[in-house]
Image: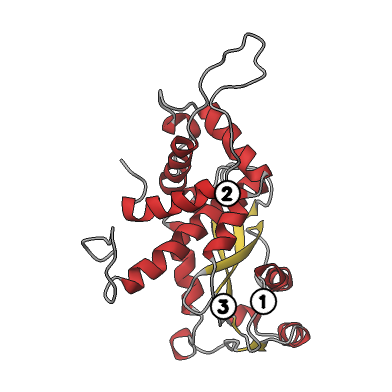
Amino acid sequence: MPALPSWLTEPLWDQFAVLLPARPEYQPDHPLGCHRRRISDRIVFDKMLQLLRFGCSYEAIADPTCSATTIRSRRDEWIRLGVFAEFKRIALESYDRIAVDGAITKAPGGGEAAGRSPVDRGEQGLKRSGMTDGYGIPLSRVLAGANRHDSPLLASTLDLLDDLGPLPDDITVHPDAGYDSDKTRALLAERGLHGKIAHKGEKAPIQAGQRWHVERTHAWQNTFQRLARRYERRTTVINAFFDLADTVITVRSPIRQEWTTHRWDGRPHRRP
């Protein structure tokens, strides 16, 4: 069963393949002058998408075409090369508004960035402080234990704006009422950002503003079972899967928006 439809998988792979270094089909320095043929990067990429989408274990997704060990080793190789981060960077093209919010997911495997969840009977959980553009395209995130409050993570989240390249002159940040404090306003002023912060004590529908975009993005990310229930223990691996999911969301969004106004080769027959 494919993890994603072909109209989305193919453009993702075309860009991902460009970032991969050239590798010989056989290991050239093998002492006997021979070796098993290298597993195709495309096969491993498809396995990574299946892991991300279905949230199953490496052993469950392995088959005669690719072992669990190969998936893990290729994953780590791509992380060392910075392929996932660069893949996401290329997918981000434009942004004009920014929304910030936190979300808590389960982390039954514990590991780095996990902590006691205040909403899950103290079980291990992961909090992500996410940042999106005005439509909901995920820009970046900060990972922390589930017992961390959103507000102290705002500074480190906004610091990631420096990694996104040239920014618009006028940026408005839309945090929820959890950030309603003088400290938050001072933090935004120091960075030359405008803040449209929800006020504590007022009902959300009245003052929702543009904040719902980031909350919808959290829901989009949680459709990838690898992110909704995290078993990975290393932060580098967690971020790699987040970068892959964010790239899928980023590429999928303009296709969905343009489906009603444009026609192109390989256009889905139905609205995505």
Q: Horizontal and vertical percent for residue 27?
A: 61, 22
Residue displayed at 66% across by 88% down:
169
Q: CA distance from mark 2 to mark 1?
A: 23 Å
* Sequence-first disc among 2 and 1: 2
**Element at label 1:** loop
Between 260 and 105, the one nearer to me in the picture: 260
| Residue 124 visible at all | no
Note whether 222 is above or below 99 in the view shown.
above
N-terminal of the two: label 3 or label 2?
2
Q: Which residue is mark 1?
A: 166
Q: Quadrant of the C terminus?
A: bottom left
Q: Which mark is residue 99?
A: 3
Q: How many marks?
A: 3
Q: Which structural element holds mark 3? A: strand
Q: Residues within 10 Å of mark 2 (few under 14, many from 20)?
A: some
Return the x and y of residue 185 as percentages of the image width and height: 72, 87
- How far separated are the C-alphas under marks 1 and 3? 18 Å
In the image shown, does 159 or 164 lie closer to the viewer?
A: 164
Q: Which residue is mark 2?
A: 19
Q: Are marks 3 and 2 in contact (CB under 8 Å)?
A: no
Identified by mark 2, the residue type is Leu
Picture quarter containing residue 231? top right
Which residue is farthest left? 269
Q: Amino acid at mark 1?
A: Pro
Q: Is residue 81 shown left or right of residue 105?
A: right
Q: Is residue 32 left or right of residue 184?
A: left
Considering only vertical position in the picture, is 71 above or below 116? above
* Dot 2: element: helix
Q: Which mark is residue 232?
A: none
